[in-house]
Image: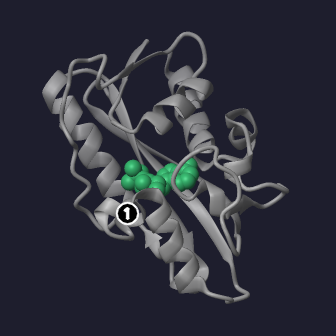
């Protein structure tokens, strides 16, 4: 089965390629010849995920999915949440986001947080949603250089290392993205 993954984020593509089983042919936007920056203008992960998959469905008419992910920090009332990608200034990148997060948290002992992923799947014109989350803790300083985004500052519950210190295979055992993908894959298996 062919499925277009509506993202330009190479880190997400690499993770999803590790997760998706044989029998599914993941097609990236690059492979589909689509060059657009899909906007994320909404206040919820669900609406942003939907915007991305709907945009690609309208362009191609083919089954596709997208995901939107946020890091929700309890002591910051759920921030950065849906604004995780643009928490610091645009040109400050992932390390700017991490620096801002650690600065805002300071020495606050409440470091509980979660990653939440919402997937929007459009199959034969119908839209379906799947959600996965991973609870964990924000470190006092970044550790490790694997992964992307907030991985170096996040230790999942039940783990001893940050996502930034884990291989992609290790991260997969805890990952919010994998949990949401498991639901999507189970759904597709049930329909076939
Ligand atoms: P988006 O889903 O592309 O809007 O991602 C929002 C931001 O969340 C990204 O730019 C990353 O900074 C961060 N992010 C998303 N997924 C992960 C993850 O699995 N680990 C660490 N950071 C992530």
Determine whether the residue tagged by mark 1 lies in a helix, strand or loop.
helix
Identify the residue at horizontal 80%, vertical 54% (top origin). Answer: 161
Q: Is residue 37 above or below residue 158?
A: above
Q: What residue sits right under mark 1 in the picture?
A: 92
Identify the residue at horizontal 22%, vertical 60% (top origin). Answer: 41
Give percent across and percent down for residue 152: 64, 57
Identify the residue at horizontal 61%, vertical 26% (top origin). Answer: 18
Residue at the far left in the pictured view: 59
Q: Quadrant of residue 84?
A: bottom left
Give percent across and percent down for residue 79: 47, 76
Give percent across and percent down for residue 8: 33, 36
Q: Quadrant of residue 29?
A: top left
**Which residue is at the front of the view, 103 or 63?**
103
Q: Quadrant of residue 3?
A: top left
Identify the residue at horizontal 56%, vertical 36% (top origin). Answer: 181
Q: How many marks?
A: 1
Name the quarter where the N terminus is drawn: top left
Is the image coloured rainbow, by chain, by secondary structure, or in one colour?
A: one colour
Q: Report if residue 115 is visible in the image.
A: yes
Q: Residues within 10 Å of mark 1 (few under 14, many from 20)?
A: some
Q: Report if residue 117 is visible in the image.
A: no
Q: Is mark 1 within 8 Å of ligand 1?
A: no
Give percent across and percent down for residue 43: 30, 68
Q: Is 153 situated left or right of 131 in this image? A: right
Q: Is residue 8 above or below residue 86?
A: above
Q: Is 132 situated left or right of 118 in this image? A: right
């Amino acid at each position: 089965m062919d499925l277009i993954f509506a993202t330009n984020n190479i880190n997400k593509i690499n993770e999803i390629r590790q997760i998706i089983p044989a029998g599914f042919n993941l097609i990236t936007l690059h492979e589909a010849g689509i060059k657009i920056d899909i906007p994320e203008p909404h206040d919820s992960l669900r609406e942003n995920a939907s915007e991305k998959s709907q945009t690609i469905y309208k362009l191609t008419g083919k089954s596709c999915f997208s995901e939107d992910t946020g890091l929700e920090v309890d002591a910051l009332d759920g921030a950065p949440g849906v604004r995780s990608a643009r928490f610091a200034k645009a040109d400050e990148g992932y390390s700017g986001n991490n620096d801002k997060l650690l600065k805002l948290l300071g020495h606050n002992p409440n470091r509980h947080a979660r990653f939440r992923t919402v997937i929007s799947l459009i199959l034969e014109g119908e839209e379906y949603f799947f959600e996965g989350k991973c609870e964990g803790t924000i470190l006092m300083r970044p550790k490790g250089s694997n992964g992307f985004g907030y991985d170096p500052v996040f230790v999942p519950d039940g783990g001893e290392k940050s996502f930034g210190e884990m291989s992609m295979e290790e991260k997969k055992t805890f990952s919010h993205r994998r949990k949401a993908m498991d639901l999507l894959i189970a759904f597709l298996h049930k329909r076939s």
